[in-house]
Image (spheres, helix red, strand yellow):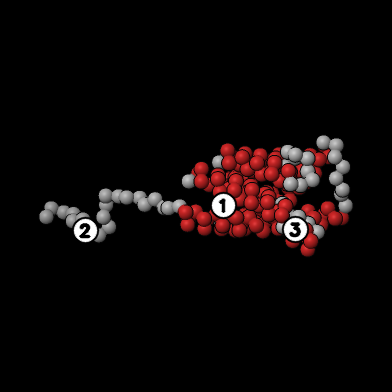
């Protein structure tokens, strides 16, 4: 199921980037286009291995940058840092707890734009920073963080629908009686 998991994550990343670029509802209502890939990176790093995290960082970052005003490749490093960081401490994280998912989602969705901004400044770009940036950063952090538990529930539902549980077969029957003693 690991290959299927990677394929589902990459397909959802592609659809997420497509939806962000195609539908401007949030952009018109709130003045912000949320970035949903950091939350998906949290899910990928808790549910898949480092190859899937790397593929999501590269392809998701390139897809996102190709449809945004960012220079191509700027979003790869923030996504990979998020994925590698969460993956490094995944044994300490309570994966199935909604609270942990929300906290990680808020942290990742807030960290990604800041690291992207630092990379843009180091490349010589001059992005516009002001109170509008603070509003956009807060809304992106909130929306991106709130979607992480939804990613977990969506993938759980997909895997329950398409996957199967292995049944551990044993030679012991629960309905048999064991007689002990001499007779």
Q: Are marks 2 and 3 in contact (CB under 8 Å)?
A: no
State the residue lying farthest toward the front: 22
Depicted 146 relative to depicted 40: above or below: below
Image location of residue 171, percent across then percent down: 26, 49
User: Nearest the camera: 15 or 127?
Assistant: 15
Residue 4 appears left or right of 99: left
Report the Cα–Cα distance between label 2 and label 3.
Answer: 67 Å
Q: Are marks 2 and 1 in contact (CB under 8 Å)?
A: no
Element under disc 3: loop
State the residue lying farthest toward the left: 183
Can the viewer see residue 1 in this picture? yes
- Mark 3 Cα-neighbour bin, 10 Å: few <14, some 14–19, many ≥20: some
Quadrant location of the C terminus in the rendered image: bottom left
Closest to the camera, between mark 2 and mark 1, is 1
| Badge number at residue 95 | 1
Q: Earlier in the sequence, mark 1 or mark 3?
A: 3
The residue at 74%/46% (across/down) is 67
Residue tagged by mark 3?
24
Residue tagged by mark 2?
177
Report the Cα–Cα distance between label 1 and label 3.
Answer: 32 Å
The residue at 55%/41% (across/down) is 49
The residue at 35%/50% (across/down) is 168
Element under disc 1: loop
Q: Residue 101 is drawn in which quadrant?
A: bottom right
| Badge number at residue 160 | none
Depicted 180 relative to depicted 79: above or below: below
Image location of residue 30, percent across then percent down: 79, 61
Image location of residue 1, percent across then percent down: 48, 46
């Amino acid at each position: 199921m690991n290959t299927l998991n990677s394929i589902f994550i990459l397909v959802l990343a592609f659809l997420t980037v497509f939806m962000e670029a195609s539908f401007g509802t949030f952009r018109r209502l709130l003045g912000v286009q949320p970035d949903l890939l950091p939350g998906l990176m949290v899910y990928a790093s808790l549910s898949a291995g480092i190859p899937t995290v790397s593929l999501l960082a590269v392809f998701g970052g390139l897809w996102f940058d190709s449809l945004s005003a960012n220079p191509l490749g700027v979003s790869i490093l923030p996504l990979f840092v998020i994925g590698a960081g969460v993956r490094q401490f995944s044994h300490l994280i309570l994966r199935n707890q909604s609270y942990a998912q929300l906290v990680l989602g808020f942290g990742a969705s807030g960290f990604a734009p800041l690291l992207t901004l630092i990379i843009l400044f180091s490349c010589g770009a001059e992005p516009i920073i002001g109170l509008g940036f603070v509003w956009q950063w807060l809304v992106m952090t909130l929306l991106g963080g709130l979607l992480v538990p939804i990613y977990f529930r969506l993938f759980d539902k997909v895997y329950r629908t398409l996957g199967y549980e292995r049944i551990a077969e044993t030679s012991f029957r629960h309905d048999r009686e064991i007689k002990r003693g001499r007779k």
